[in-house]
Amino acid sequence: MKNYPILKTNRLSLEQPRITDIPNLLQYAGHKKVAATTLNMPHPYQEEHAIFWLNMANDGFQSKSKYIFGIRLKETDELIGGMGLHLTPQYNRAELGYWIGLPFWNKGYATEAASAILKFGFETLKINKIFATHLVENPSSGKVMIKNGMIKEGELKDHIKKGEVYQSVFQYRLTKREYQMIAK
């Protein structure tokens, strides 16, 4: 794949993040509630974090180790979040991660974007398993996974450390075979 992929849904376009996205990244990724509900989002979110994310997306695409997309509203081209797959080629699996800006919560955007990413992972990248985790305190993220057919594998107790606090996560999965069963 030479060009950065563009994934389209009914309401969204998932595309390469752009330098012009930095103001939206600072506004949406920088919200305290977004940071509190995600595994790796720093708070406060500053310009260097946005630049790091843009570089990670570009470097990941070049090395074929990460496919990170800016989630945009089709109507306005506004960046409202981010979603991506972090590949582990030796096991032919990937981890799905995402965030959505607070003004866009509870509108189905994460579910819609995840559907496109899962299809891309299984049908284009030919991945065998995609998994995702979410903080126990963020059941809405679990609903996104469940709505996309992902299956809860279990709870990973005190699995991550945010600040000085250890937190547990729930892990979900979807294998290629399971995806093929629900994609029919």
Image (tube, rainbow, N blue to C red):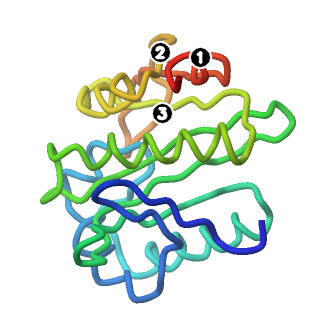
Q: Secondary structure at mark 1?
A: helix
Q: CA distance from mark 3 to mark 1?
A: 28 Å
Mark 1 sits on what residue? 178
Q: In the image, which is nearer the foreground, mark 3 or mark 1? A: 1
Left or right: 5 with respect to 170?
right
Q: Against 37, is 76 above or below?
A: below
In the image, 134 versus 66, the foreground residue is: 66
Residue with the mark numbered 3 = 160
Q: Quadrant of the N terminus?
A: bottom right
2 or 3: mark nearer the eye: 2
Q: CA distance from mark 2 to mark 1?
A: 9 Å
Instruction: Count the labels in the image.
Output: 3
| Residue 147 screen position, x and y as percent | 33, 26
Do tag 2 and tag 3 residues touch (Cβ < 8 Å)?
no
Residue at point 50% right, 20% down? 182
Q: In the rendered structure, are the residues bearing label 2 and label 1 in contact, judged by CB atoms less than 8 Å apart?
A: yes
The residue that label 2 is drawn on is 151
Whole-percent x, y for residue 181 in the image: 56, 16
Q: Determine the secondary structure under disc 2.
A: strand
Q: What's the residue at 31%, 61% (across, down)? A: 43
Q: With respect to residue 128, does 17 lie above or below? A: below
